């Protein structure tokens, strides 16, 4: 009964949230006529507006896709640039590309209309555009242009600000050292293989209920207690790159210990060895 009730509440939450958002927009961002006239348009204009809506929908889709993909691949390229800047490396471990999708997606959703409107205003009849915008806002019940601008400011911009410090994140493995850049790091942290104390391979992690989740990674512990994780900020992996594992074993000279999770690793061991 409880699960059925929760499911019903979950299904009702989405339309309720949409209704609440529309109510707020209609109250806070009422329709403001650009032509100082809120009267219904004449029939000939009404037919034209309906056709224009379809054309605009196609244009918005194209602009949104172009903007989103451009921003996404720009972030991917910038992240790769920071990794390449560390010099020749045996391995480059970059964060999952999923994190580069959030800002482009929200930017495309909130800015595609602004860009399409600017292009349309540059090439089209501005008087007709103003009339169309008045009609479109009346159909929506609120000033849709202002609403999207506020969404860009309150949603897309903060996501973009939060994404920017992640651009340099990476780990590069060189012959004698690791160079690691985390979130919002100004310069790479240099970790030398000669300072390695223990090397582990873990199969995954357990959630709060104790259920095991597969996430294989290598963990290197250094003399000062710091740990480096091969899977940090990366996609879940069910296996370890054999070449990476062999490279680390050769460079550190430490035998890998195997555990189910990082929580199973003892605080101290008398001697390195397989578990």
Image (cartoon, helix red, strand yellow):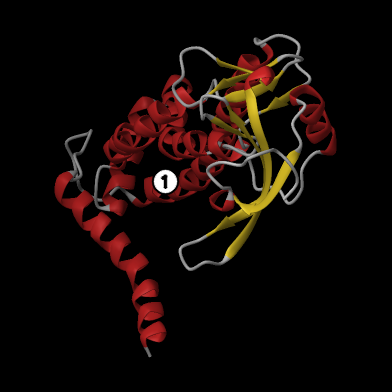
Q: Is residue 172 left or right of residue 228?
A: right
The image quarter containing residue 271 is top right
Element under disc 1:
helix
Residue 46 position, x and y percent, is: 38, 50
Q: Nearer the viewer, residue 109 or 61?
A: 109
User: Among all residues in the image, which is located at the extreme bottom?
Assistant: 1
Q: Nearer the viewer, residue 65 or 45?
A: 65
Residue 61 position, x and y percent, is: 55, 41
State the residue at coordinates (65%, 34%): 198
State the residue at coordinates (34%, 38%): 155
Q: Residues within 10 Å of mark 1 (few under 14, many from 20)?
A: many
The image quarter containing residue 192 is top right
Q: Nearer the viewer, residue 201 or 30?
A: 201
Looking at the image, residue 270 lies above or below residue 118: below
Looking at the image, residue 51 lies above or below residue 6: above
- Identify the residue under disc 1: 49
Residue 23 position, x and y percent, is: 21, 57
Image quadrant holding the N terminus, namely bottom left
Q: Nearer the viewer, residue 242 or 19?
A: 242
Total marks drawn?
1
User: Among all residues in the image, which is located at the extreme front?
Assistant: 270
Looking at the image, residue 78 lies above or below residue 55: above
State the residue at coordinates (29%, 46%): 137
Q: Is residue 19 left or right of residue 3?
A: left
Residue 16 position, x and y percent, is: 29, 67
State the residue at coordinates (30%, 52%): 140
């Amino acid at each position: 009964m409880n699960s059925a009730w929760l499911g019903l509440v979950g299904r009702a939450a989405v339309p309720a949230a949409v209704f609440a958002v529309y109510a707020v927009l209609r109250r806070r961002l009422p329709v403001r006529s650009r032509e100082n006239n809120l009267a219904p348009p004449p029939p000939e204009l009404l037919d034209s507006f309906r056709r224009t809506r379809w054309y605009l929908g196609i244009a918005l889709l194209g602009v949104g896709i172009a903007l989103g993909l451009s921003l996404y691949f720009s972030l991917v390229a910038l992240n790769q640039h920071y990794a390449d800047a560390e010099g020749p490396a045996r391995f480059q471990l970059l964060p999952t590309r999923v994190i580069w999708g959030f800002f482009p997606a929200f930017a495309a959703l909130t800015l595609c209309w602004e860009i399409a409107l600017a292009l349309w205003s540059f090439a089209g009849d501005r008087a007709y555009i103003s009339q169309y915008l008045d009609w479109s806002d009346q159909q929506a019940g609120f000033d849709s242009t202002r609403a999207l601008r506020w969404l860009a400011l309150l949603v897309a911009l903060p996501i973009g600000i939060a994404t920017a410090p992640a651009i340099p994140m990476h780990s590069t493995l060189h012959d004698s050292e690791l160079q690691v850049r985390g979130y919002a790091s100004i310069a790479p942290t240099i970790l030398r293989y000669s300072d390695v104390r223990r090397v582990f391979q873990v199969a995954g992690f357990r959630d709060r209920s104790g259920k095991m989740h597969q996430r294989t990674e290598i963990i290197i512990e250094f003399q000062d207690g710091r740990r480096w994780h091969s899977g940090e900020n990366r996609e879940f992996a069910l296996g370890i790159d054999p070449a990476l594992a062999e490279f680390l074993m050769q460079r550190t000279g430490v035998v890998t210990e195997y555990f189910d999770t990082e929580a199973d690793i003892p605080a101290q061991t008398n001697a390195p060895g397989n578990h």
